[in-house]
């Protein structure tokens, strides 16, 4: 049955519409751009995650019922918390969170039983606090190597070195990392269902031609145009933290140690992931790596996982960089922004459909600390008559320049004149600026966090291991630019 399109007014078959409610035919419905596609992809992934979580919860309940020799059950109602007892005076004034109790219990359960040693037995007061903060909301489960729940963690049987599903701790870890590092929080991240994921993006636009009236019946009388499609690849890379501490540890010291350990993990995740995004370079040789261009990097350096944002404008597309070879001329920042135009400046080759530099608020300017301090002294921002009430002479800080947010993380460092780091720190004297659009990059998560705790008996030590698998990629060209060899 034909329907009339409200836009073009032509009767078309029903299969030319998305659904019965669609008023415009497919020919009149614009294709989403790359950014819109990513937003739609994230929405779809969120729906799939919700369905997966519901299915996972059902499998957990079935597994627990099987252990108890009962029939599978539907999810039970949330257990009401018991009235607070004496434990509240012991723990609550210290500000411990559910994540702290999760991690403390994991450490107690994982440091002995795997090697046949006695586990660290928690006190009744600790377990009362643990049950109040953790099991009243959602139990923690022991999982197998595939992440499938085996049984609930309880006082009878603890971790045995296997990873534990502590949802609150994992979520808090990455939320803290995003909050601690603007660069990490700005780049969109999607879950990965496989070690390698292909994400569709816009290809080149079909070219529109100017032609005269055709006098030929040939199907190729006019030059044809093609609509290209493309994709980018996310490949998961493995990261780990290996930490050892002394075996002189009882329940009290574990509880006191846990908040400090969580804080260190949060900071480490933020700094290393942010640095990998910015400084990534897979070149592992005696020369050439942008982070160590005159030596061979250690094989385990975090920045070897993928090619990052700086690598793009320093190596992949050198025309995106500017050799300042002098003190920074602040106008060069706008010149750098002008290079985020999505395509090459060649009207005869292509007319692009993306301009990554259009909206200043969506861009990010990353610079080393000395360059940031020199920006504070720029005559464009230091006085009230030039910069208004936000003048640096009044505030002592500079949050934006030309509307572009500025960040200066610790892993944005000075370099040599060629824009690359030397193994000799004294040679790294030149400032550097990276300007990029976070929407031009995408992160992926194949495995959030796995935690293991083991006892090293012969040295009377505990080994803590954290593992995660992450990915990073770039959309198209001209998504970043930079200025190097800045005298500071």
Image (cartoon, grey):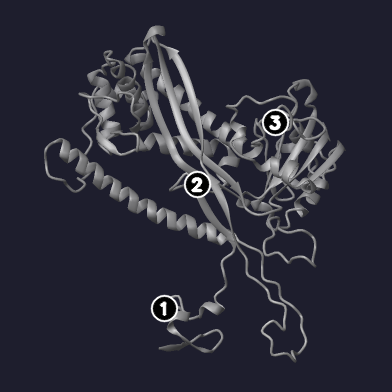
Name the residue beneath numbered marker 2: 196
In the shown orientation, is residue 473 left or right of residue 238?
A: right
Q: Secondary structure at mark 1?
A: loop
In the shown orientation, is residue 387 left or right of residue 406?
A: right
Q: Nearer the viewer, residue 450 or 88?
A: 450
Identify the image quadrant of residue 203. bottom right
**Marks 3 and 2, the one that precedes in the sequence:** 2
Q: Nearer the viewer, residue 278 or 334?
A: 278
Q: Secondary structure at mark 3?
A: loop
Q: Nearer the viewer, residue 161 or 390?
A: 161
Instruction: Find the distance from the CA under tag 3 to the CA under tag 2.
Output: 26 Å
In this picture, is 422 found above or below 283? above
In this picture, is 136 found above or below 286? below
Horizontal and vertical percent position of residue 395: 71, 37
Q: Nearer the viewer, mark 3 or mark 1?
A: 3
Seen from this angle, which residue lies furthest left? 70
Looking at the rendered image, the quarter that the N terminus falls into is bottom left
Q: Which labelled disc corresponds to residue 21?
A: 1
Q: Secondary structure at mark 2?
A: strand
Horizontal and vertical percent position of residue 213: 76, 90
Name the residue beneath numbered marker 3: 291
For image coordinates 53% across by 44% down, the residue present is 235
The reply to whether callout 1 and callout 2 are in contact (CB within 8 Å) is no
Q: Nearer the viewer, mark 1 or mark 2?
A: 2
For image coordinates 74% across by 29% down, the residue present is 287
In this picture, is 444 found above or below 103? below
């Amino acid at each position: 049955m034909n329907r009339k399109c409200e836009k073009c007014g032509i009767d078309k078959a029903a299969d030319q519409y998305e659904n019965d409610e669609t008023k415009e035919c497919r020919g009149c419905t614009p294709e989403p751009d790359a950014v819109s596609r990513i937003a739609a992809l994230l929405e779809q992934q969120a729906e799939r995650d919700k369905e997966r979580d519901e299915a996972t919860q059902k499998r957990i309940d079935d597994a627990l019922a099987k252990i108890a020799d009962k029939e599978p059950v539907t999810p039970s109602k949330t257990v009401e918390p018991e009235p607070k007892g004496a434990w509240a005076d012991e723990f609550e004034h210290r500000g411990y969170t559910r994540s702290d109790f999760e991690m403390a219990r994991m450490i107690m359960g994982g440091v002995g039983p795997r090697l046949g040693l006695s586990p660290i037995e928690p006190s009744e007061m600790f377990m009362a606090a643990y049950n109040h903060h953790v099991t009243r909301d959602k139990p923690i489960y022991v999982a197998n190597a595939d992440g499938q729940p085996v049984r609930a963690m309880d006082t009878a049987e603890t971790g045995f070195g296997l990873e534990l599903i502590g949802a609150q701790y994992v979520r808090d870890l990455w939320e803290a990392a995003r909050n601690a590092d603007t660069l990490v929080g700005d780049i969109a991240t999607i879950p990965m269902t496989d070690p390698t994921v292909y994400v569709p993006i816009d290809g080149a636009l079909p070219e529109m031609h100017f032609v005269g009236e055709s006098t030929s019946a040939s199907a190729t009388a006019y030059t044809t145009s093609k609509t290209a499609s493309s994709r980018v690849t996310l490949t998961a890379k493995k990261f780990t933290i290996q930490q050892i501490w002394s075996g002189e540890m009882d329940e009290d010291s574990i509880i006191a140690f846990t908040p400090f350990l969580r804080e260190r993990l949060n900071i480490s995740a933020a700094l290393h992931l942010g640095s990998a995004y910015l400084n990534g370079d897979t070149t592992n040789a005696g020369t050439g790596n942008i982070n160590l261009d005159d030596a061979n990097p250690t094989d385990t350096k975090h920045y070897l996982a993928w090619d990052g944002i700086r690598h793009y404008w320093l190596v992949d597309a050198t025309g995106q960089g500017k050799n300042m070879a002098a003190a920074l001329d602040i106008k060069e920042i706008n010149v750098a922004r002008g290079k985020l135009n999505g395509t090459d400046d060649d009207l005869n080759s292509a007319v692009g459909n993306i301009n990554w530099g259009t909206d200043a608020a969506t861009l990010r300017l990353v610079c080393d600390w000395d360059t940031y301090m020199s920006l504070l002294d720029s005559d464009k921002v230091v006085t009230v008559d030039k910069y208004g009430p936000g003048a640096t002479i009044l505030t002592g800080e500079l949050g934006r320049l030309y509307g572009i947010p500025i960040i200066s993380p610790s892993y944005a460092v000075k370099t040599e004149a060629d824009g690359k780091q030397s193994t000799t720190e004294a040679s790294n004297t030149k400032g550097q600026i990276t300007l990029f659009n976070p929407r031009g990059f995408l992160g992926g998560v194949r495995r959030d966090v796995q935690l293991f705790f083991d006892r090293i008996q012969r040295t009377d030590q505990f080994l803590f291991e954290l593992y995660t698998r992450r990915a990073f990629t770039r959309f198209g060209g001209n998504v970043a630019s930079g200025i190097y060899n800045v005298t500071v």
